[in-house]
Amino acid sequence: MSATNAELWGSRYRLIAAENWKAKSAAMGGAVTEALVEYSQPVAGMAVLDLASGTGEPAISLAGRVGPEGSVIAVDQSSELLEVAAERARQRKLANLVTRQADAHKLPFAQHRFDLATCRFGVMFFADAIGALAELRRVLKPGACACFAAWGPIDQPYWQTTMKIVQRHVGGAMLAEGGENPFRFSAPGSLTNALRNAGFQKVEESTRNLPWTWLGDADEVLDYACTLSVPFRPMLERVPERMWPAIRAEARAAIERYRVGNEIRFGADVVLASGRA
């Protein structure tokens, strides 16, 4: 991730948005966080590294699971996002969680330090995925597990009712050529191949459909997606102001089809993968 993109991920407008929607955002992503935590099988006393931790998950959940005798280091390139994560840990009195600003391609840790590593919706954005994964393997103890959650295909409700609708109106590419791609590892076996090429053993991968539920109105979903989805920024900046009313109307109607009572239940196809150092 370039310095420019690192600034975008931690930009002030994203932090304000994250604060405004933190309860609804946490509810929407909660099932994915829980699935990754369960998949990683943390136990008391483990030393855990959480890459691309952002505002704190799954690092916070993992800190609760490994207990005071264990430890979690939450790593991200954005110091601003890590400040949010650190405050959330303080609010939960999790003294065993610390944050560290660092690049996944050059981790500031000794080799064979960690018992477990996790990465939730971050591996897709590593500029050199194999290099970053090899660097992660370096800091894991022999036999330690690294566990990842990545987006499945774009052809699923959340993206179809937001970014795909924007693209239909504005035209052109949805993602910049050669830029960050949330769906980089959506093809079955692609993350497996990257892990194996980085030297991981006993690699496993599966795609699961998990709850992805927004507890609010449809207009909020589009606002949230547009504000927080940095890889789509070039496309969003091409949208003339006159187009937004039509985009909003179409997106609202599409999103409402997933409403059940007070909830908008999209569901999400998520790739879960793991390998051992």
Image (cartoon, helix red, strand yellow):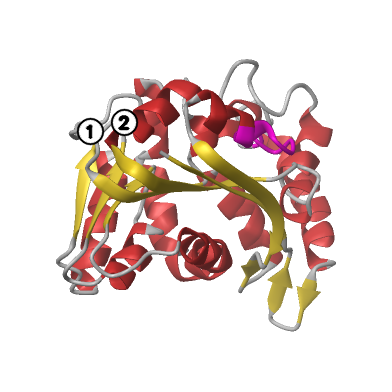
For the residue labelled by badge 1, is the local secondary structure a helix, a strand or a loop? loop
Q: From the viewer's perspective, is 106 left or right of 232?
A: left
* Residue linked to disc 2: 138
Q: Image height check: is 256 above or below 52? A: below
Q: Which residue is rendered at x = 57% and y = 41% of the image? A: 203
Badge 2: how crowded within 10 Å, few (<14), some, or many (20+)?
some
**Residue 15: percent from left, percent from top:** 37, 50
Q: Main secondary structure of the magenta part?
A: loop
Q: Judge whether residue 276 can be spotted in this image.
A: yes
* Marks 1,2: beta carbons within 8 A: yes
In which quadrant is the C terminus drawn?
Answer: top left
In which quadrant is the N terminus drawn?
Answer: top left
**Residue 126: percent from left, percent from top:** 47, 28
Q: Which residue is rendered at x = 24% and y = 40% of the image? A: 79
Q: Which mark is residue 111?
A: 1
Q: From the viewer's perspective, is 216 left or right of 264?
A: left
Query: In terms of image quadrants, where is residue 67?
Result: bottom left
Amino acid at the residue labelled 1: Gln
For the residue labelled by badge 2, is the local secondary structure a helix, a strand or a loop? helix
